[in-house]
Structure formats: C-alpha cells, structure tokens
Amino acid sequence: MIKSFMMDKYYFIMTYGCQMNIHESEKLAGILEETGYLPAQSVADADIIVLNTCCIRETAEQKIIGHIGSLKKLKKNKPALKIILCGCMTQQNGKGLEIKEKFPFVDYILGTHNIGDLRSLLSGGAGGVFVEDTDGYINDDLPVTRTSMPNAWVNIIYGCNNFCTYCIVPYVRGRERSRTMDSVKAEVERLVKEGYKEITLLGQNVNSYGHDLNDGTTFAKLLNLLADIPGKFRLRFMTSHPKDFTDDVIDAIASHDKICKHIHLPVQSGATAILKAMNRKYSREDYLALVAKIKDRIPSVGITTDIMVGFNGESERDFEDTLDLVEKCRFSGAFCFIYSKRKGTAGYNMTNIVQYEVKKERIKRLLALQNKITREENKKYIGNVFEILVEDINDRFENTYCGRTDCGRLVNFKSDADIRNKFVKVRVTRGATATLWGEVTEVE
Ligand code: 5AD
Ligand code: SF4
C-alpha cells in the first residue's frame, strides 16, 4: 500500500558500441527494474540516466563526451537526477577520475568489472568513481531485462587474451573467462522455453571459448550441445577469430540446421606484414585458405568481416593486398574502419603512422569495392526462397517487416498481418546495396 504513495521513478540507458554493450545494458536495466525503476520514454523524463560507453575508436569517445556535456543543463534543472557512467570508456587507466574532474555533475562512474555495484549505489550508497583494477569476474547472476525479442543475447566468454596491437579491449575487458557449458545450456533452455527464437552467443573471440576452463570444454562441443536442445530456434554467434577457427567448429556448423550459416570473421588487413604488426597471428594465405575451406564445407555460408585501413606502416601496396583479398573472399558484408590510435595499446607508440588524408582516401576505395561486391552478391539471391525469422517492423515503409536469412542477409517484405517473431518463407525479388526485398510465400 505504501507503494501507491510513492512517485514512480524512471531510467534511461544510452548504449554505445557493440552487441556486448547492448546485452550489458539489458543487465543494467535488469538491476534498475529489480530496484523498482521503470523505463523512461526519453532522457528528459528520466530520474536516472546511464551511459554505457565504448572506447574502441576516438570518434566513439568524442561522441560520448559530447553527450555527457549536453546532460549538464538537465542536471542543473533537476538536481535529483542521477547520472551514471559505465562501460569500456570508464575502465581505461585513470579515465574515471579524469571524467569526474571534467564533468563533476556525473554522480557515479563504474568500470566494466563491477556493474553489479549499481545495486548498492541505488540503495543509497555514496557517489564517486568505482573502477576496479582486476582481470575480471563473471557477472553471471545479474537480472536481465531483454529488449531484443525474438533474439536473445547470451555471453559465453568475457574478456580477451589476444592483445591485437591496435585494440583497447583486452585492457578494458580483462582476461578470457568462459562460463561453463552447463550454465550456458541452462540459460539457452530457459530462453527457448520463454519463446526466444534466435540465440546469439557473444564473446570477443568465441573460438577460444573453454580454453581457460582446462577441462576439455571447446566451442565446438558447446555448439553441438546447444544445437541438440529441442524446439524451433536458431543459434548465431560472434565474433570469431581466424587463428582459432578449428575444423570441429566448421563441422558443427555444417551438421546442424539450427546453427546459422553466417560467420563474422574479421580479417582486419589483407597484407601479411600488417597482420604481423597487428599481432593477429595469421597470414593473408592462412585467412584465404580458411575462407576457402569454410565455403567448401558450407556452400550456403555468408561470411562478413571487419577491415581496418591505415594501420601504422600500411603502404599503398599493403592496402592493394587488402583490396585484392576483398575481391577474392567476396564477403557478403564488411564493417570498414579507419585506424584510430588508442592510448595504452602497443600501436599507440608506433611511429610509422599513415596520414589521415591517405586513410580517408583508402577507406573510400575500400567501401566502393565492398558495396559493388555486396550488390553483385545480392543479385544471386534473387528468385530464391529463404526461411527468415521476422525480427521487426521496418517503419520507414508501410506494412513492412524485416528479418535475416540463415546466412545473415537482411530482407524487407510486406505483410498486412503482424508477423513479428514468426518464421516465414520469403522469395527474394530485388536487392539494393545493404538490403534485399522479397515477398512472403509462407508463414509458420
Ligand atoms: N581503430 C579502428 N578500428 C578498430 N577496431 C578495433 N580497434 C580499432 C581501432 N583502434 C575495429 C576492428 C574490430 C572492430 C570491432 O573494431 O576492426 O574488429
Ligand atoms: Fe581486440 Fe583482437 Fe581481442 Fe578482438 S581479438 S577484442 S580485435 S584484441
């Protein structure tokens, strides 16, 4: 009864960066809702604003810094408003204190290893900077408010041991920690029972899943175990590291209908010398051989990638090797980035930097090539029928829904009935650059 006299309290979470962060925000929402907070429709309506940050590139950090600055006025007009910062940006060495000094109106700053501490802060703990310097724990027991039905994100491994020389992630996410197969299986079983139809397994490098458990656990074993769970659902996973992509994983993908034939396999560069400088531990030839092997074993596979241009020492010839690899692999999609130096990484101290103008010119050429390939590959889908899980409404068009094929291609299609969360059969009728269009031929 006392409750009816209390004012409702609202939270708003701003999420930056990758799928890991999107899922972590679902855990933050879980904690907030457990404490009685409700989701706000906008920042202005919130009593608590959480910024779940990213620092993979400088542009990401600049955007967040801009957003923090813009909250100052809101806080001034509403002093009871609580502003909380967490995520990768805050975990960087000394960054928490630096932010607090620059933006004193931020109430709490948490690191990546202690988002569970949000609970004590909500129950009246003092404000300040709480960033733990540790290799990390497994935050396995936090409540989760899922926001991406029919897809559910499931962490299988946290952290990264690879120390690619451009990458900040190992410094802000700690060492690799795998959940046990039993704990992942129990979560997936529960999610399937709850009606989730797509489970996406998450890790910085899913292929090294289990190595740290030293009990014979491997990613392939996990895939086989999860694919045997009864019910109609799909399994996806990301991200894969080419150096750890073993044959038993290829076999698992090939032999289970439930495992989507989509592999996100970041190459980063097509030049062996640059891959070496990046500490990627595979050569151009290794990568090409792996792609050939995967395509041979799984002919319907869609392979997507991440590519960086302008890493330290990248010559025009090295860049042309990247273009050539892109031609050869014919990725169904690629995320392309300009290298951005990150303090604390080995790349930060390298002196053979590539001028920004050169980087800009290279990314333009790379994008033009990949867009041409995506268009050409999309044409090959026209006329074929695919099973698609309807994920959402595409509100840019009337009565339009969207979802992905098993091999990861996004398709739009019209329907008068609400077909969200259903499996449908769609015949592809035309292909634009990033998206395909089709017509529904069957609904489950
Ligand atoms: N600069 C630019 N891109 C980066 N990535 C990681 N670190 C950097 C950086 N310092 C890219 C890589 C990675 C993707 C998630 O982000 O391509 O695969
Ligand atoms: Fe970063 Fe490399 Fe680890 Fe990926 S594998 S998170 S790129 S260090």
Image (cartoon, grey):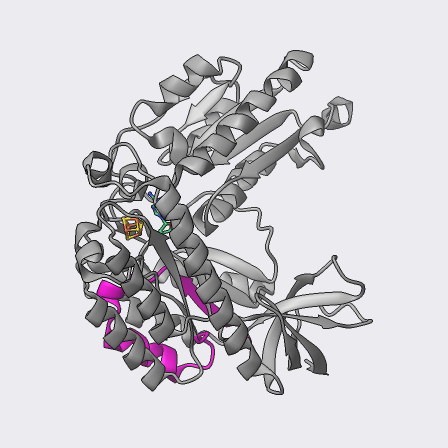
In x, y percent, where is residue 50?
Answer: 54, 31
The residue stretch that appears in magenta: 232-261
Q: How many marks?
A: 0
Residue at (30% x, 40% y) in the render? 168
Residue at (44% x, 24% y) in the render? 109
Does the image show residue 126?
A: no
Name the one closer to the observer, 230 or 348: 348
Name the one closer to the observer, 17 or 7: 17
Toward which corner of the image does residue 185 lie, by quadrant?
bottom left
Residue at (60% x, 62% y) in the render? 150
Residue 242 is covered by the magenta coloring: yes
310, above or below 49, in the image: below
Name the one closer to the observer, 216 or 234: 234
Residue 441 is covered by the magenta coloring: no
Name the one closer to the observer, 163 or 228: 163
Toward which corner of the image does residue 212 lie, by quadrant?
bottom left
Left or right: 204, with 194 as reference point: left
Left or right: 320, with 72 as reference point: left
Toward which corner of the image does residue 239 lie, by quadrant?
bottom left
421, above or below 111, in the image: below
In x, y percent, where is residue 340?
Answer: 35, 40
Does the image show residue 325?
A: yes
Left or right: 416, with 79 as reference point: right
On the rendered image, what quadrant is the C terminus found in?
Answer: bottom right
In x, y percent, where is residue 43?
Answer: 66, 30
In x, y percent, where is residue 192?
Answer: 54, 66
Left or right: 178, with 410 as reference point: left
On the rendered image, what quadrant is the N terminus found in?
Answer: top right
143, above or below 221, in the image: above
Residue at (36% x, 57% y) in the render? 307
